[in-house]
Image (tube, helix red, strand yellow):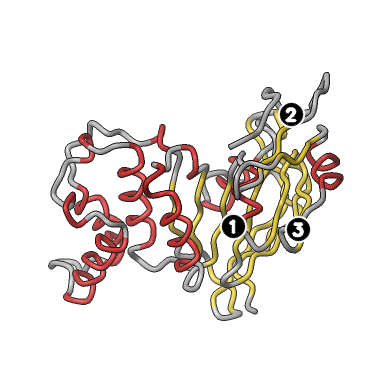
Amino acid sequence: MNKIIDIRNITAGYGDKIVLRDVNLSLYENDFLGIIGPNGGGKTTLLKVILGLLSPVRGEISFFNNEQKVNQLKIGYLPQLNQIDKKFPISVKEVITSGLAAQKPRPGRYNQQQLERITEVIGQMGLDELADRPIGELSGGQLQRVLLGRSIVADPQLLILDEPNSYVDKRFESHFYELLEEINKRSAIILVSHDIGTVLRMVKNIACVNETLHYHSGSDVSADWLDDKYACPIELIGHGEIPHRVLKDHTHCHNTTDKKSHS
């Protein structure tokens, strides 16, 4: 399988504060990588490096397309909900359409194939009846579907999801994860989440980011591995059909302010 991202010895931070240190990671076509780790451990910083929003202090990140090194990838990004201005006067269809802005003919309108793709994604997200509605009138779960539609409408090589489970509405939750399985047939996915149970259920491989990065091939990680990489003791708890993990009783955790991580 072809590699699309190669991260080598990346160290990154803000000012004099180092958040990531000597991180190495390779991502391949159709990979589905779950990134977990304690608050403050560097998950968001790693995303910023991949997205080109933060230059590393040291190290190199390389991108590939069909085994050829390229300057950048086509990346779709689903941010956390609190980064979205719901007061902005724009409709559901306009938001999804904006995901094709970089491909719009100049001058001119979107071509027929692009218009059909927009309609296809609106239907795929279950938003047909809401297409003309302003985003300010949507629930958190509905807005998430809109943003997911925007992030995939251009058929990205990589889709990055930052804590998507934090505002999935329950009526759409199972369909949301089914959609990710379908999207993964066309795009590699990075899913960042504090909900370890959801991550283990969905992904193909795991990376724990806690200043450094620890990679685990496959999602069948042990409690001991999680204990060690989180630098906090973690206990597996059964919860319906979806197991989740919480931190065991402890007095100190490096790089974390929360005592629990659960669904």
- The image shows residue 121 at horizontal and vertical percentages of 29, 63
Q: Which mark is residue 255?
A: 2
Q: CA distance from mark 3 to mark 1?
A: 11 Å
Amino acid marked by disc 2: Asn
Task: Residue under label 1, please give it.
Answer: 202
Per the image, label 1 sits on a secondary structure element best described as: helix
Q: CA distance from mark 3 to mark 2?
A: 25 Å
Q: Is residue 90 left or right of residue 34?
A: left
Q: Are marks 2 and 1 in contact (CB under 8 Å)?
A: no
The quarter holding residue 11 reads top right
- The image shows residue 132 at horizontal and vertical percentages of 13, 49
Question: What residue is shown at x 26% (from left), y 70% (from top)?
Answer: 117
Label 2 neighbourhood size at 10 Å, few (<14), some (14-19), many (20+)?
some
Quadrant of the image containing the C terminus: top right
Closer to viewer: mark 2 or mark 1: 1
- The image shows residue 58 at horizontal and vertical percentages of 72, 48
Compare residues 240 and 146 and report the one nearer the observer: 240
Per the image, label 3 sits on a secondary structure element best described as: loop
Compare residues 189 and 223 and report the one nearer the observer: 223
Looking at marks 3 and 2 on the same chain, the residue that comes earlier in the sequence is marked by 3
Label 1 neighbourhood size at 10 Å, few (<14), some (14-19), many (20+)?
some
Looking at marks 2 and 1 on the same chain, the residue that comes earlier in the sequence is marked by 1
Amino acid marked by disc 3: Asp
Label 3 neighbourhood size at 10 Å, few (<14), some (14-19), many (20+)?
few
Q: CA distance from mark 2 to mark 1?
A: 26 Å
Amino acid marked by disc 1: Met
Per the image, label 2 sits on a secondary structure element best described as: loop
Question: What residue is shown at x 83% (from left), y 19% (from top)?
Answer: 251
Task: Residue under label 3, please give it.
Answer: 220
